[in-house]
Every structure is written in C-alpha cells, then in structure tokens.
Amino acid sequence: MLLKNNYLYSLILLATITIIACKKEVNERTAPEFKATAIDANGGDWETVLLTNSSEVSIPAPDAVNSSAYQAEMTQIAQLQGNLSYNDKKIINTWKSSGMVKWNEMARALVAKYNLPPEANPDGTYPAPSAANPGAYPKFPFANPPYASRAYAYVSTALYDALVACWKYKFQYNRKAPSVNDSRIKALETLQTDLPSYPSEDAVVAQVNYRLLKVFFPLDSVQLLQMATEQKKAKLLSGAASATDIAAGDAIANYVATKALARTKTDGMSLAAGNPTLWAELESKAVARGATTPWKSLEIPVRPAMLPLFGNVKMWNISSEQRDSLRPPPPPPVGSVQFLTALNEVKHYATHPSGETWRIAMYWSDGVGTYTPPGHWNEIACNLLAKYPLNELRIARMLSLINMAMADAGICCWDTKTYYYYPRPSQMDGSIKTIGLPNFPSYTSGHATFSGAASTVLGYLFPQDQAQLEAMAAEATISRVYGGIHYRFDSEVGLACGKQIGSFAVKRAQADGAN
C-alpha cells in the first residue's frame, strides 16, 4: 500500500508543478515513434555494471489479478479513462513511444544549455561553478565534454542495471498490463502484450533519469520531476501499467540510482579541476619528458586548462594501468619535419576552405552551446532505432555501452593531453583561424577519441551499419583538421586510441548474456 500511495502522491504533485521549459533547444534528427517486438524474456539474467546482479534489488510480489486490491486499481484506471482531459490525451500521445529516447534527448538538451564557459572576473581570474550554490554565476554545471561524457555514462548505466532488474521481476511474476487483465480498460497505446507490466519499465526509466539528472543539472529539478511524473501518469491512463506496477518500478530505480550516485562521490571528479600548484606541476613534468613548447591558453585573460586532472577519474571498463598502457607515444617534436608538414596542412585548410571541408568542420564542431561530441554520438545511436526498433532494455544496453566507452575515452584522452602538454596549431602560427579554440592541450583529439570509441561499439551492435559508422568517425576525425583546431596526427592517433578503448566495451557486450 505504501508503494501505491507514493505513486498517487506523485500524480497529485503533477497538477501543481509549473512547467519550466529548457531554454536551449537542440536541433537534431529525432528517431520516429516505434514499438519493439522482441521482449528478451531472459533479460533479467544479463550481467549488470553497478549491481552485483539483478537479484541485488528486492521488490515484493504483486497482488494477484483477482485480488480485491488489484481490482480496486483496475476500477481506478477505468474511471480515469472515462474522464480523460485534453492534457491527459496529450501526455499519453507524448509518451506512447520510447521513453529511453525522449530522456536521452532531454539529457542532451540540458548539456547544451549548460555548455557555456564562465566569463572572466574584472581582476582577470575566472569563477568556477559551484554545486553547493548552482544558481549563482556561473551557473552549475559547466557541461563541457568531460562533464557531459561522465553524466551520459552514469545515467545510461544506471538505466541499464535498473531495467535488467526490472526484467527479472517481470518474468518472475508475469503480471500483464491492466488493459490485458481487465476488459473495462482500453489499451490507449500499442503494447507488447507478452511483456509483463510489473514492474513498470516506464517508471524505471522516468525515476532513474529524474534522480540522476537532477544531481547533474540541479537547476532543472522541477522540470525533470514534471517530466518523470507525466511519463508515469501516461502509462497509468493508457492502460499500460497500474499504480503498483509503477511503484515497483520506482523502488528498483531508487535503489540503483542511489548506488550510482554513491559512485559519483568517489570517482575522483571532484579533483579534476586541480589548482595552480598542480597545473604548474603538470607542465613542468611535460617539459621534463621533452615538451619544448608547452601548450598555453590563448584566451585573454589566460584561462586555466579545462579539467586537467580528468584523466585520473575512475573508468568503467579500463583500469588505471590499462590507461597507461593505452597512452599513445609522444607526438612529433615541435619544429620537426613531421610537425611542420602537419602545421602547414592545418594552415592550408584554414586559409583555403572549400564548401565541403567547411561543411564537415561545422557539422562536427560540437562546441560551446551544443550537446558536445559524446552527445552527438548519442543522437546517432538513437537515430539507428529508426531501422532497429529495440525494446527499452536493449536501448539501455546500447546507450550504456557507448557511453561507458566514451567516458573512458575522454578520461584516457585527457590523461594524454596533460601528459604531453602539446601546443595547438594556432599557438604555433597565429595566422591560423579556427572555428573554435578548446582551452586544453592539443594531442590527442577528443573528438577523434570519442568518435573512435562510439563507432567501434555501435559497429559491433549494428554490424550492417559498421562501414557507415566508421566513415562517420573518420569524418569527425578529419573535421578538426579542417577547422584549424588539430594536427592530423592528433586526430589519427586519437581515433586509433578511441577504437582500442571501444574494444573494451565490446568485450563487455560479448560476455553480458544479451547475444
């Protein structure tokens, strides 16, 4: 009864929440509405990431369909369906397709909204966003690529684990949807009728996203709560789930979300920004390794490097020892023939852009005010669902695998950047004009490393599209040369390293029981 009452409270709360629209729209190609056909009845046996296994989460057995308690729930839904408002019908229509995709779009929109570097103080220093006071300037967070890759990974991994647990109990208890169990209730959306409704996968998706995204983007908590509550209400009104189906999904989601948030407190992200002493130490170590011209910020006033110690954050599929073994060899010495050849190539594209090179540079720029390169690959992944309509569990697996790979790729790339402290082309030749100027060392390219990791994982999951995905990664890689931001060796080495990192996620996928 407590689970049911908690959900009914959330329905009341929905009526009192004011919609706060996300200020930054994301212009993208969204996947069409679809309903998956495969149910993956063995999904509860798949290997988890944060959980020991799906049995770690415990929920009570549901009431029998002929019990008075369940029949009271059915009567409630029938009465609600008899009095649907215009807004009720609107939210049913909004949520009739994949909630996983809609929430992924929301996460990308929030990243774009907060991907804004702070302006300098009058004294030439730069303020830092504070999670303890997120509304003060600069607003928290600054959702740069490292921050974004970490957020995408935590959200998608928690969703995957929670849905594996959800699938375990679905097929353990096998209680079907209200519209299947009671003739008084209409199915107001197309259901997978063989997929049990207890616990509700939509409640899991809504609650995990709400719990995690409100931590990563605290100023949008009200909007996120409304979105989660609307999704749950839509499933109740449409006959897809009862109040206790939804409450059981909430219970699973809350358990996994709490475990994911505990990991965020110990993964080392709080130390990623460093301090002036550590910044100087990083540069001096690079000089000792042979850096003759260390990277310098070209911003005025000089801005500290973006999260220079992000390379020490805990990874998902790779140990710190493996990170060190994956670190690429040194870049060409500044002034060498190989260096000058690469620098001249960057200058050529900067001074003689063609329509095609400019198009490619802009399409993959993913700079300030966008959902970042990891977000771009999340969009690509979701768009694949137009061809391959997966169920929510399969979508969660896909997104967790690519986002763990990209988070690890970002960590390894930032480790390489601060290890070598290599100067960017525009630092070495001030005449080179760029489409943007990321405030951190050049070698290796983050875009290329993220793209190599994501394309490797997606190519494994969708082998029919592997060649196209590899071509996209190659285009993303060369785009940074066309944009005046990276030398060719930054990009090519980054792509190769990203592919190696993606292979660790592929090995996880090969062993997780889903094939």
Image (cartoon, helix red, strand yellow):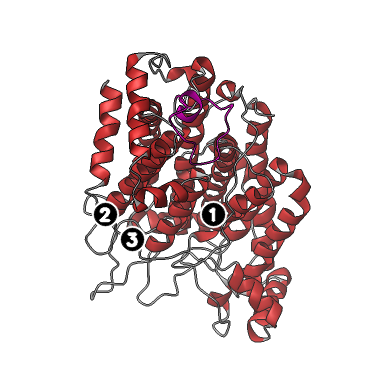
At numbered mark 1, what does the secondary structure look like: helix, strand or loop?
helix
> Viewer-proximal residue, 160 or 181?
181
C-beta proximity under 8 Å, tags 2 and 3:
no
Image point (57%, 55%), residue name: 379
Name the N-terminal-most of marks 1 and 3: 3
> Viewer-proximal residue, 177 or 370?
177
Is 381 drawn above or below residue 262 in the view shown? below
- Residue 368 location in percent, x, y? 45, 68
As drawn, the label of residue 374 is: 1
Instruction: Indicate the amino acid at tag 1.
Output: Pro
Name the N-terminal-most of marks 1 and 2: 2
Is residue 82 among what the camera can see? yes
The alpha-carbon separation of the residues under discs 1 and 2 comes to 23 Å
- Between disc 1 and disc 3, the foreground one is 3
Q: How many marks?
A: 3
Q: Tell me which corner region of the image, top left, top right, bottom left or bottom right, holds residue 280.
A: bottom left
Residue 194 lies within the magenta run? yes
- Residue 333 location in percent, x, y? 65, 65
Q: Which residue is mark 3?
A: 21
Sort mark 2 into few (<14), some (14-19) or many (20+) by Cα contacts within 10 Å.
some
Instruction: Indicate the amino acid at tag 2.
Output: Ser
Instruction: Indicate the amino acid at tag 3.
Output: Ala
- Between disc 1 and disc 2, the foreground one is 1
As drawn, the label of residue 130 is: 2
Which residues lie in the magenta part?
178-198
The alpha-carbon separation of the residues under discs 2 and 3 comes to 23 Å
Image point (32%, 30%), residue name: 76
